[in-house]
Image: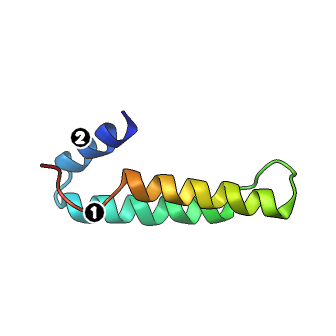
Amino acid sequence: MLKTLFEIVATMADDPDKYRSDVRKKLLEVADTMPLAPMPAAREKKVRAFVKETVGNLLINQRPN
């Protein structure tokens, strides 16, 4: 559902590929810097890696079929 939402918004942009690329870059920055609840460092690393993987899968910089 979230992927569909990003695609709908991207189609309204002047340059959909640039929009997806810019949003992806910003979300990856947030994944690196967002303060998290206290947890062991290893767990924090796994959480951030999962978020980055999810963002990467949501915002693949290619046009849908």
**Residue type at the position of mark 2:** Ile
Left-right relation of 22 to 29: left
- The image shows residue 61 at horizontal and vertical percentages of 27, 63
Query: Residue at 18% of width from left, 47% of height from top?
Result: 11
Mark toward the viewer: 1 or 2: 1
Q: Residues within 10 Å of mark 2 (few under 14, many from 20)?
A: few
**Residue type at the position of mark 1:** Asn
Residue sticking out furthest to the left: 65
* Number of numbered discs overlaid on the protein picture: 2
Left-right relation of 40 to 7: right
Is 16 situated above or below 8?
A: below
Q: Nearer the viewer, residue 40 or 8?
A: 40
Q: Which residue is mark 1?
A: 61
Q: Quadrant of the N terminus?
A: top left
Question: Which colouring convention does the figure follow?
Answer: rainbow
Query: Residue at 35% of width from left, 55% of height from top?
Result: 59
Q: Secondary structure at mark 2?
A: helix
User: Residue 8 got which mark?
Assistant: 2
Q: Secondary structure at mark 1?
A: loop
Left-right relation of 57 to 61: right
